[in-house]
């Protein structure tokens, strides 16, 4: 049985046990992740002992070096949606740091690694702070710019040997064991690749990982969950740079020489190319891409001159054509093609005994929760919201209604901090909200849903809902990568499941959110908002686009929440729904407050009829 049986929750309808046949295994059992890791754990040592020619061992080492950088790009570009052409520069920082320190200062390579990582972290942090606020095409352009700058910097510093670089770097060894070339280096490199892959898989499947995966769905949704999107962008930028730096460190000691050509823009583009071909959204895509590109490159360099009869870099042309075809016919990369065909295992439910999350102190029934005072919003000359005032008391379900263009959404955005009011004040539990960022308002206990559903389609319903509990967790990126967040994760998932069960969505726990029907997506958003343990729930047109049956189900959920004493502001266009469920209505027209009263009073009002019902019905 999948759900922890809780006597205070309605029993989940049939189907719950269907979705729950998974055995209790470790928490990242979903998908084929563990099989991939297991495969690598077996393959890597096996390759090292098999009598393979040295050439192949060396090729596999290069694949590992590329894969490390590509893993960073999966996190940054594939998951976080931030395109970077400049990763090669961070490989360069790792390589040059160790080259210069070991050759000129005689420092041990094992000490230069942490030094290189520190320099990379600081550089990436500074570059990130400057460039990551850019959006659209500006960010990739900025990455090209600093990729080029670092390249020319490396090529023009005397101490770094200008374009000749640094020669005579010693090879790696540890306790007398040679890790410089051959199987030793292969094992060392792939140990890093494995560690990075495991860390990344854990990260993506964590509280921080869900926040990172929310970045691509736009800042609005993530910020309304109390997430600082900028902070996460900088964080993944730094992590991706650190992976690249490790690759550079290994590279320098493998080649025994460094020069700027390996770290220029061309390589930066190639790293992105490899990752996109392999599957930029998948951890295994990085490995697939690195392997395929390296192997194909070698084969083509031998094959093409024979076919064509003259030598030259013809493989570049083939790669160019391949990339175009790839982007057209398999834009999610080769690994995506494989992953779609793999069976998807449900996440094992193992949080039944996790302690419940702490809850915030809620206002007592009847206490003033929201006090909107003469709030005004002008867009240029248009007064979208004209000095509106109304209040919500704890336990009330208040509907904000009005014809299209009346200013409902704008009012909603003023309350939730998406827009700043031109003047006026919004008091939430006695505290001024006007001027605060939406994530700060969310942290104070206001949770919302969206008129146009915003969720992460390739995450399960459960994971999407757990995102709502973001502010109730503490564990960060590094705890997740080191697997130190298991206890907290179980608590968050338990809460997510509880909220889904609460509104009858229990049977859909493990479904991909993108596969849900519209009505269920709306309920998912409500469960996600409830996961934040809100003192006030704001719903923006939850009935929009729903069919009759779905509207009935929504009304039932709203009535249930009302009985449970949840304070709700319902912004809605659908008159039937608001008349059915609301305690009180606030009616807007052309930005002004037309009237306030019970559904009966509003229905009887001739003004409202004229403004709204008259024109609509
Ligand atoms: P409702 O949600 O009640 O349909 P809105 O709050 O979306 O109404 O819009 C109220 C008025 O404000 C409309 O006339 C709309 O065109 C205008 N408006 C809304 N957002 C903006 C904006 N960002 N810039 C300019 N005008 C806007
Ligand atoms: Mg609207």
Image (cartoon, grey):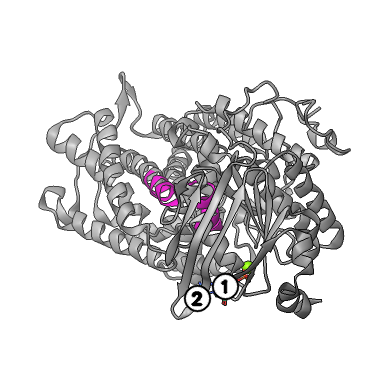
In the rendered image, residue 220 lying in the magenta stretch gets the answer yes
Q: Is residue 408 left or right of residue 10?
A: left
> Total of numbered circles in the picture?
2
Question: Which percent across, then down, holds residue 592?
Answer: 57, 71
At horizontal 42% and vertical 53% (from top left) the residue drawn is: 436
The quadrant in which residue 342 appears is top right
In the rendered image, residue 312 lying in the magenta stretch gets the answer no
According to the picture, the residue beneath numbered tag 1 turns out to be 591
Looking at this rendering, what residue extends furthest in the top direction? 175
Q: Is mark 1 within 8 Å of ligand 1?
A: yes
Task: Tell me where the magenta segment starts and ends, as one range.
Answer: 214-238
The tag earlier along the polypeptide, 2 or 1, is 2
> Which label is found at residue 105?
none
Looking at this rendering, what residue extends furthest in the right direction? 14
Q: Secondary structure at mark 2?
A: strand
Location of ligand 1 given as a quarter of the image = bottom right
Does the magenta stretch mainly form a helix, a strand or a loop?
Answer: helix
- Tag 2–tag 1 contact (CB < 8 Å): yes
Q: Secondary structure at mark 1?
A: loop
Can you say whether 422 is above or below 167 in the image?
below
Q: Is mark 2 within 8 Å of ligand 1?
A: no
> Which label is found at residue 383?
2
């Amino acid at each position: 049985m999948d759900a922890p049986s809780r006597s205070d929750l309605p029993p989940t309808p049939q189907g719950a046990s269907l979705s729950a046949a998974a055995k209790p295994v470790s928490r990242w059992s979903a998908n084929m992740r563990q099989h991939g890791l297991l495969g690598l754990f077996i393959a890597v040592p096996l390759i090292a002992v098999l009598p393979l020619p040295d050439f192949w061992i060396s090729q596999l080492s290069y694949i590992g070096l590329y894969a490390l950088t590509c893993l960073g790009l999966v996190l940054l570009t594939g998951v976080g949606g931030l395109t970077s052409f400049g990763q090669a520069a961070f490989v360069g920082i790792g390589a040059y740091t160790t080259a210069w320190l070991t050759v000129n200062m005689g420092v041990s390579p094992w000490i230069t690694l942490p030094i290189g990582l520190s320099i990379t972290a600081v550089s990436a942090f500074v570059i990130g702070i400057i460039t990551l606020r850019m959006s659209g095409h500006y960010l990739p352009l900025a990455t090209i710019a600093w990729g080029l700058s670092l390249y020319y910097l490396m090529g023009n510093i005397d101490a770094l040997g200008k374009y000749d670089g640094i020669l005579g770097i010693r090879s790696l060894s540890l306790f007398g064991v040679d890790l410089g070339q051959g199987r030793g280096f292969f094992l060392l490199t792939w140990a890093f690749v494995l560690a990075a892959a495991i860390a990344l898989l854990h990260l993506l499947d964590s509280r921080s990982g869900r926040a990172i995966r929310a970045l691509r769905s736009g800042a609005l949704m993530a910020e309304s969950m109390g997430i600082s999107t900028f902070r996460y962008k900088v964080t993944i930028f730094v992590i991706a740079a650190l992976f690249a730096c490790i690759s550079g460190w290994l590279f320098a000691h493998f080649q025994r020489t460094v020069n700027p050509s390996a770290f220029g823009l061309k390589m930066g583009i190639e790293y992105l190319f490899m990752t996109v071909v392999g599957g930029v959204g998948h951890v295994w895509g990085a490995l697939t891409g690195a392997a395929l590109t390296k192997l194909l490159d070698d084969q083509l360099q031998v094959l093409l001159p024979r076919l064509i009869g003259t030598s030259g870099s013809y493989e570049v042309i083939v790669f160019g054509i391949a990339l175009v075809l790839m982007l057209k016919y398999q834009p999610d990369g080769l690994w995506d093609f494989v992953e779609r065909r793999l069976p998807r295992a449900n996440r094992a439910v193992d949080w039944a005994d996790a302690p419940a999350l702490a809850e915030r102190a809620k206002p007592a029934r009847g206490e003033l929760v929201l006090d909107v005072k003469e709030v005004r919003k002008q867009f240029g000359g248009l007064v979208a919201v004209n000095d509106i005032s109304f209040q919500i008391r704890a336990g009330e379900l208040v509907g904000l209604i009005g014809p299209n263009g009346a200013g409902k959404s704008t009012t909603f955005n003023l309350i939730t901090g998406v827009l700043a009011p031109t003047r006026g004040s919004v008091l939430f539990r006695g505290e001024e909200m006007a001027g605060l960022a939406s994530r700060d308002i969310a942290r104070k206990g206001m949770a919302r849903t969206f008129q146009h559903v915003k969720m992460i389609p390739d995450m399960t319903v459960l994971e999407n809902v757990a995102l709502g509990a973001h502010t109730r967790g503490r564990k960060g990126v590094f705890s997740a990568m080191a697997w130190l967040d298991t206890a907290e994760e179980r608590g968050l998932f338990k809460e997510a499941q509880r909220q889904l069960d609460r509104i009858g969505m229990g049977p859909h726990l493990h479904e991909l959110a993108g596969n849900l029907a519209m009505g269920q997506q709306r309920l998912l958003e409500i469960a996600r908002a409830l996961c934040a343990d809100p003192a006030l729930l704001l719903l923006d047109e939850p009935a929009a686009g729903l069919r009759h049956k779905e509207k009935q189900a929504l009304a039932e959920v709203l009535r249930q929440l009302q009985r449970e004493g949840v304070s709700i502001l319902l912004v809605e266009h659908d008159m039937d729904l608001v008349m059915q469920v609301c305690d009180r209505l606030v009616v807007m027209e052309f930005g002004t407050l037309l009237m306030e009263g019970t559904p009966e009073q509003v229905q009887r009002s001739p003004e409202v009829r004229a403004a709204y019902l008259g024109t609509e019905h």
